[in-house]
Image: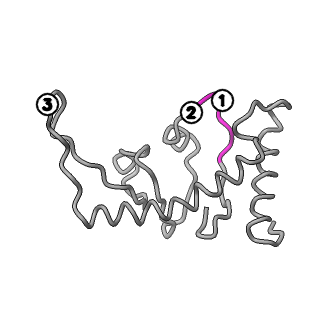
Amino acid sequence: MNKKGLIVYKSSHAKGSTHDYALYKHSRPDLPEEVVLGLDLGYQGILDDYPYLNCLLPFKRKSLGCGKRGVKAQPLLELQRLFNRFLASAMAVVEHANCRVKKFRIFCDEFRNRLRHYDTMTDIVCGIVNFCISGKLTI
């Protein structure tokens, strides 16, 4: 997605339910260095696997340890909370684009056509969503 909510890249389909980070490892798009990825906590550990990747991850509260009853995790610093809020507002654009695509019910329902046509159909849906957002045809 870009700042306007246009769908720039869509990975190919994966069989069954697959976690986002596992799908990212499998399809791994080559991105220019100036592209910054805004990710959620599901991608925790991506900097260990890809240290050269330019990405933003939200901060998570640190737990004091398992098995300690009645002990709460340490709260985040004010700057960390502001960064998480900024990242969440930027990720809202992605969630809005996901909502637009889901209205076509291609991702949530059973696909009743040939599986080899699935990627083509999802490309068409993403193109229609981009057309609705930008108001002009881009190829």
Residue 60's disc number: none
Given the image, on which type of amino acid does mark 2 rest? Thr
Q: Which residue is mark 3?
A: 68
Q: Which residues are magenta?
A: 11-17
Residue 51 in the image: x percent, y percent? 36, 54
Which mark sits nearer the N-terminus, 1 or 3? 1
The N terminus - image quarter: bottom right
Q: Nearer the viewer, residue 47 or 122?
A: 122
Q: Which residue is mark 1?
A: 15
Residue 80 in the image: x percent, y percent? 28, 62
Mark 3 neighbour class, 10 Å CA radius: few under 14, some 14 to 19, many 20 or more = few
Given the image, on which type of amino acid does mark 1 rest? Lys
| Viewer-side label of 1, 3 | 3
Residue 18's disc number: 2
Q: How is the image coloured?
A: one colour
Q: Quadrant of residue 32?
A: bottom right
Say if the magenta span includes residue 14: yes
Image: 44 above or below 78: above
Q: Give the dominant element type of the magenta stretch: helix, strand or loop.
A: loop
Residue 31 in the image: x percent, y percent? 55, 60
Q: What's the distance in space between the residues labelled 1 and 3, CA to CA?
A: 40 Å
Q: Which residue corresponds to the image point at 58% horizontal and 57% vertical from the top-left?
A: 94
Residue 135 in the image: x percent, y percent? 80, 72
Tag 3, which secondary structure?
loop
